[in-house]
Image (cartoon, rainbow, N blue to C red):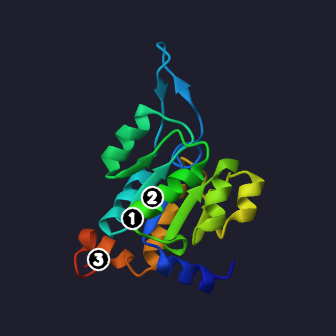
Amino acid sequence: MAADDLKERAGRVTTVIFDIDGVLTDGSILLDSSGSEIKRFNVHDGTGIKYLRRSGFNLAIISGRASSAVDARAGDLGIEHVYQGYKEKLKAYADLKKRLSIIDREVAFVGDDLPDIPVMRLCGLAVAVANARQEVLREAHMVTEATGGAGAAREFAEWLLRATGRWDQIISRYYGEKECKDE
């Protein structure tokens, strides 16, 4: 997709939805000796999500599986809208749109697998992680260079913040109003 079209789509986004397994994780499911599920999240992805929140984007998770680890991670990142156990993600998507009074073109969705396709076909900006299934890659408006659980969410977050002119707001917190220069 042309860069101008992507930037136009980005300019309409108010809400970013992430899948979990294969997007915010590498897709692995670890079980401890008691059978409890353990998920591994990337801190850089989390930082990117916090930047989106700080910049005023609504954030949500729609996952086909349910896990207490997702609730904990969402709480840590300040993600208020968490839908777990939705094999048919359109139901959660419709509820979120109603709850936030938003329309399709205002939504970016980041996915990786077949259950993500129905939402990707409706939303304004469909994003696939680099290691997404081929069918998902074909539905995406953009594809990250990073794989799921290994910086894809951070890559997309920074791209969206730059495309919407909000990146300078984020980095000014660390640099101050003037860039640091060697003397």
- CA distance for labels 1 and 2: 6 Å
**Residue located beneath label 2 in the image:** 96
Image quarter (top left, top right, bottom left or bottom right) of the N terminus: bottom right
Mark 1: which amino acid?
Answer: Leu
Crowding at mark 3 (Cα within 10 Å: few <14, some 14-19, many 20+): few
Q: Please state the horizontal and vertical placement of residue 18, each as a whole percent of the image.
A: 51, 54
**Residue located beneath label 3 in the image:** 182
Residue 144, visible in the rendered structure: no
Judge by depth and name the residue closer to the eye, 181 or 114: 114
Count of numbered circles on the image: 3
Mark 3: which amino acid?
Answer: Asp
Q: Please state the horizontal and vertical placement of residue 40, each as a whole percent of the image.
A: 48, 37
Crowding at mark 2 (Cα within 10 Å: few <14, some 14-19, many 20+): many
What residue is at 76 percent from the left and 56 percent from the top?
A: 135
Q: Earlier in the sequence, mark 3 or mark 2?
A: 2
The residue mark sitting in front, 3 or 2, is 2
Judge by depth and name the residue closer to the eye, 171 or 127: 127
Image quarter (top left, top right, bottom left or bottom right) of the C terminus: bottom left
Residue 11, visible in the rendered structure: yes
Q: Please state the horizontal and vertical placement of residue 45, each as a whole percent of the image.
A: 45, 53
Residue 114: which numbered mark, if any?
A: none
**Residue located beneath label 1 in the image:** 100
Q: Is residue 82 left or right of residue 173?
A: right
Q: Classify 25 as above or below 162.
A: above
Do the numbered discs 1 and 2 sit on residues whose CB atoms are within 8 Å?
Answer: yes
Q: Classify 124 as above or below 73.
A: below
- CA distance for labels 3 and 1: 46 Å
Q: Is residue 167 left or right of residue 110?
A: left
Residue 173, quarter of picture: bottom left
